[in-house]
Image: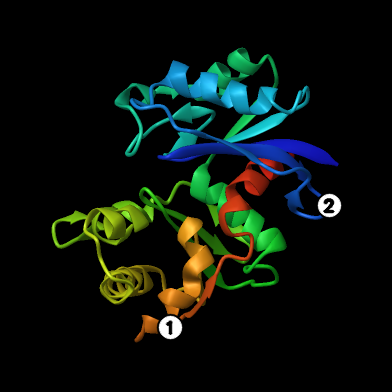
Amino acid sequence: MNVFGVDIGGSGIKGAPVDLERGDLAQERCKVLTPHPAKPDAVAASVKDVVGRFGWSGPVGVTFPGVITGGVTRTAANVDESWIGLDAAALFSDALGLPVTLINDADAAGIAEMSFGAGRGHDGTVVLLTFGTGIGSAVFTGGRLLPNTELGHLELHGHDAEKRASSKAKEDHDLSWKHWAARVEEYLAHVEMLFSPDLFVIGGGVSRKADKFLPLINGIRAQIVPAQLQNNAGIVGAAMACLG
């Protein structure tokens, strides 16, 4: 069974049909740049562009980088503030003329990794962290998701952790892998103190280069592994969300 998934990020919007039996993309994904400013109508038009390129006519799952409750976007850390309090599920459904299910972006990635990737078969506490424009999080215990955790906004040194340890922070401050890994290590230690996970899954685009920084992280009790679905996890999880 194929369902369409769209992953909205701070820098790009990507989507593709997903084979839900294999947990993988059924076709090569399409990616467009996220509009700036990332206002609702502009983002909805970009999502419509992505979906339209495949001639898709069925249900669509869409991720959003913020807290989602009942299809309403409650926060908007890395997109325009006009998203706050918006019935975004209805906005996307109207723009596409198709049924849309909306889910937090990191929660979507986590669901995909728990079903088809690095978290598969783990019944303990698993924390997936996506490092990109910000830091997204998905927390699972006994295979069940605690939605909308948003652990990238934990405070470190008086600032949101994602301002220090996201991959964007690495780029903005021109940090070496060694220096960035030290910041990630500090962040993981903070999350570990709060949640005592058995497993950290590290996702986002930077997971493709896990060999450059994961071996540099020390002192964390939990096992740390890169996401297996890498940057496609959000698309797969968005499609999975359509099934409830």
- Foreground of the two, 99 or 35: 35
Classify 56 as above or below 6.
above
What is the quadrant of the C terminus in the image? top right
Which residue corresponds to the image point at 53% horizontal and 68% vertical from the top-left? Answer: 126
> Against 67, is 125 above or below?
below
Residues at marks 2 and 1, CA–CA distance in whole angstroms: 33 Å
Q: Secondary structure at mark 1?
A: helix
Q: How many marks?
A: 2
Q: Residue furthest left?
A: 158
The N terminus - image quarter: top right
Place of residue 232 in the rendered image (x, y in percent of width and height, measured from the top left): 62, 51
- Label 2 close to label 1 by CB (< 8 Å): no
Question: What residue sits 70% from the left and 60% below the top?
Answer: 115
Element under disc 2: loop
Q: Nearer the viewer's eye, disc 2 or disc 1? A: 1
82 lies left or right of 69: left
Residue 45 visible: yes
Quadrant in the rendering for residue 179: bottom left
Q: Which residue is mark 2?
A: 21
Q: Position of residue 125 (x, y in %)?
A: 53, 70
